[in-house]
Image (cartoon, grey):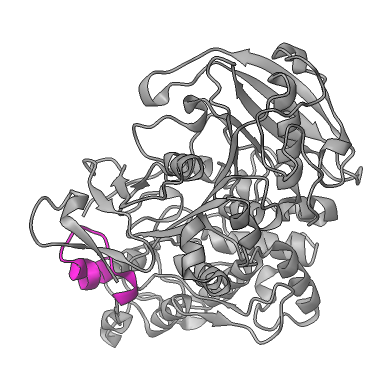
Amino acid sequence: MRRRTATVAMVAATLAAVTMAPTAPGATADGKSGGSGKSGTSGATPCAGLRGLDIPRARIGLPTRGGTVTSAQPVPASGEGATALVPYCRVDAEIRPVDRAAPAIRLRLALPDREHWNHRAMMLGGGGYNGTVPDVTGNVPFAPAGKRTPLGRGYAVFASDSGHQAPPGHKPTPSLDGSFGANDEALRNFAGDALKKTRDAALFVLGEHYSGQQPRRSFFAGGSTGGREALAVAQRWPRDFDGVLAVYPAWNAASLDLFFGYAARLLSRPGAFPGPAQQRLLHRAVLDACDGDDGLRDGVVSDEAGCRFDPRTLRCPEETVSGTGRAGHHTGAPHCLTGRQIRTVEALSSPLRWKYPLGSGERGYPGFPFLSGADMTTPLLGMGSSAPANPMPLDSGYGVQFWEQWVRYFVTRDPDFDSLSLNPRHPGRWRHRVSELAGLQDVNDPDLRPFARAGGKLLLLHGTADELVSHRSTAEYFQRVRKVMGERATERFARFYLVPGANHANVAPAFAAGWDAVGALEEWTEHGRAPHRPVVTDTGPGADGRTRPLCAYPEWPRYDGSGDPDQARNFTCHR
C-alpha cells in the first residue's frame, strides 16, 4: 500500500484554495459570451491604466453599489514546462455591498497579454467558508501532473473571496471562519450571490482590457464549497458558463452541516471517540477485508458500494480494554474498539434522517464511507485526534469545527453558543432558522434543462474515500438529475465519475486523482466530443504514475487479472 503524508499547512493551502442578470458586457443576446461584444471603451486599456477603473453597478446582475479596480500591474512570464505561466496583468478589485455594514467582495483577475490569451475565461471556486481569494495562477481540483494551469494555458482567470475576509491568523485554517454569517448580505453572497457579482464584474474589466472583446468560452471549476458553487452557477445562471467542473461538491451545504452536528454530538459522548490509533486500526481492517475485491491488492477499495466490513470483528474483549474516558467509560486500546466506539462509527457510516421539513426540501444525509475505504486519520479533514467539546478543540475534525462556526454565526448568531447543545434532529426553537438556512444554502435543483439547452456541459467528479463530503451525496444528486431529465438527455450534457481511493482535496489519499478535466471541457464544448474512455492518473509521490480507467457512475474499475496492474488498459469498468 502506498502511503502519503501531509502537513497542516498543506491542508490549509488546499482548502483556502436568483434573477437572471442583464446581458453582460460583450455577451450575446442569449447571455452567452461572444467575441464581438463591446464594453465601456472603444480601445484597449493597458494593464496599469485599469487601476481606478469604475465598475458600474448596472453591469452587475445582482444589487451592488458598483465596484472599483484597486490595483493592476503587469507580471512577466515565469516557470517552464508544466509550471510555466504566460505574462499577464494582475488585477485586484472590490465590489461594494448594498449594506454599508457588509464586507466588500474582493476579486482578482489574471489577464494574459494579447499574444498569449486563448480567448477563454476560467472562474475558480473557493473552499470551506471562503474568505480568501483563490490563487488565480493555480490549478483546478484533481488536476493532472505535467499539464499547465489555466493561466499557463492562456486562460483569463478570476476568482473572489465570496464577499468577506477571513481574519488574519485564523486557526487552524482561514477557511474555517464563519463569523461573516452574522451579516445577511455577506451570508447571501457566500450562499451564491457573490458568484454572479464576481463573474459580471470580472467580464467588465476583461472587456476594458481587451478592446471590448469577450471570451469565446467561459468555464467554472471548483471543489468542495467550490463544487457547490459550480453547481450553483449551472442552476441559477445557466447561460453564464459553457462548461462547469464540480469536484467533491458540498451542494447540500446545510444538510452536510446538520450531519457534522450529528457527528459532533456522537463523538463527544464519553468513550465514543476512537483515537488516532483506533482510526488507523479500522482503516487497515477495512482494506484487509475489501482491497482485493477488484482483483488486485493495491491499497484501494475499488468496489466501495460492495464493501461489507463488520467493525464488530474489532471489538475489545473485556480483559483487553485499557483506560477509561469521562464518566468511567472505556476508551479502548490501540488494537481494538469498544462497543460504543463501534456503534459511533456505524452511525457515521449510515444515513441520517430528520423528521422536520427544511426550506430546501432535503430530508437527510447519506453518511460516510468509513467502513468502506475512507481514512479517518487524514490531517484536519478526518476525525481528528481529540473528541469534540465546548469550546471545540483545534485538533478535532474539520467537519465538527465547521458545525460550530455554522451554529454560532449562521444559526444562533451568538459567538459563545455551545454548538453541542443544538440537536440537528430536534433543533427546537432554532428549527425555523435551520430550515431558512437550508433554503438559502442547499443548491439542490436537479432540473438542469436550461443549462443543457444553452449548450452547457457538466463534469462531476468525486473520490469514494472522501472523509469530508460524502460521494454518496453526489450520487444522490446525479440520480435526481437523471430522474428529472432522463438518462439520454443527461448523457448529452453531463458525466459523473467516481474515483476509488481518492479523498477530499487529494490530501494524503490512497489514490491522488489527476485528470485533464479542463481539456475535456474544451473538447466537449468546442468540438462536441464528450469524454471517451478517460484515464485517471495517480499523481501522488511514489505512485509511479499508475493509471486507472475513469469509470462513469455507477461503474468501478476491476483488474483483468493479467498485464501491468499500474496500467489502465488492464482494467475494465464494472457495475
Residue 122 seen in render: no
| Magenta run includes residue 426 | no
Q: Nearer the viewer, residue 111 or 455?
A: 455
| Magenta run includes residue 294 | yes
Quadrant the C terminus occupies = bottom left
Quadrant the N terminus occupies = bottom left
Identified at 52% across, 43% down, the residue is 12
Position of residue 15 measured from the top left corner of the image (x, y, whole percent):
54, 46
Q: Is residue 62 above or below residue 450?
A: above
Q: Nearer the viewer, residue 317 or 155?
A: 155
Q: How many numbered marks have been drawn onto this rendered protein structure?
A: 0
Left or right of 287 in this view: 371 = right
Q: Quadrant of residue 60?
A: top right
Position of residue 194 measured from the top left corner of the image (x, y, whole percent):
74, 46
Q: Nearer the viewer, residue 262 or 557?
A: 557
Position of residue 341 measured from the top left corner of the image (x, y, whole percent):
41, 78
Stretch in magenta: 284-306
Q: Quadrant of residue 22?
A: top right
Q: Is residue 540 above or below residue 503?
A: above
Identified at 50% across, 18% down, the residue is 86
